[in-house]
Image: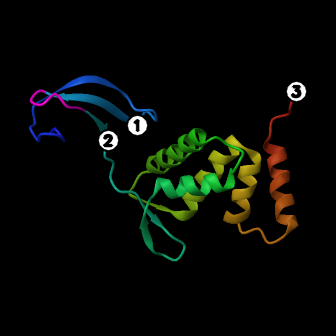
Amino acid sequence: MRCPGCGTDDDRVVDSRPALAGDAIRRRRECRSCGLRFTTFERVELPELAVRKRSGRLVAFDRARVLDGMARAAKGRVDLPDLESAAAEVERELRALGGREVSSEQVGLQVLQQLRTLDDVAYVRFASVYKDFQGPEDFELELSSLRKAAPPKTA
C-alpha cells in the first residue's frame, strides 16, 4: 500500500477490525518512512451482477438504487442501518440465485420480502408502486394477504 503522504510502500498495520456493515476489513496503517497514519478498507470483489429490465435492456445492479427505493417506501418508519442491512440481504439473495444476470422482477420480489419483515406500511407502499395498484381494491387485496400471513398478536 502506498502512503498518501510520501508515496513509499513501506507501512505497517497498526489496527485491523471489521467495518461497520461487516462486509469489509478496516485497517489503520502507519508509514514507516514519514509516520503518516491512514485508513484502508479491504473488500471482496464480486463479479458484476446485471439486471434484465422489462424492456429487455441490461443494466448493472446498483445496491444504492435498491436502498433508495426501500428508503422512499419506508420514509419515517425504518432506521437507515436496518434498510442498509436489508438492501445488502437483497443483493446476497440475488447472488445466491446463481449466474450473473437477474430479472428486475426478481429484484422487486426480494425487496418486497425484506420490507415485509421490516415494516408492513413500507411493504404496502412499495407494493403499490411495484405491483402498479390501480384502485382501492388492490390495496384491500394486499392488506388481506398481509393479515393472513401475519402471526396472531398476543396481549
Local packing at callout 1 (Cα closer than 10 Å; few below 14, some 14-19, many 20+) is few
Q: Residue at x 54, y 73 (%)?
A: 54
**Horizontal side of residue 51 vs 139, given as left or right:** left
Give, as a three-letter code, the residue at label 3: Thr
Magenta segment boundaries in residue numbering: 32-37
**Looking at the rendered structure, which numbered label has been put on residue 154?**
3
- Secondary structure beneath dot 2 equals loop
Local packing at callout 3 (Cα closer than 10 Å; few below 14, some 14-19, many 20+) is few
Closest to the observer, 11 or 109: 11
Give, as a three-letter code, the residue at label 1: Asp
Q: Mark 2 and mark 1 in contact (Cβ < 8 Å)?
A: yes
Name the residue that disc number 1 marks: 23
Q: Residue at x 68, y 50 (%)?
A: 74
Cα distance in 3D space between marks 2 and 3: 43 Å
- Secondary structure beneath dot 1 equals loop
Which residue is at the far bottom? 55
The mark lying in front, picked from 2 and 3, is: 2
Name the residue that disc number 2 marks: 44
Name the image quarter holding residue 108: bottom right
Give, as a three-letter code, the residue at label 2: Val
Q: Earlier in the sequence, mark 2 or mark 3?
A: 2
Cα distance in 3D space between marks 1 and 3: 37 Å
Closest to the observer, 125 or 90: 125
Which residue is at the far top? 14
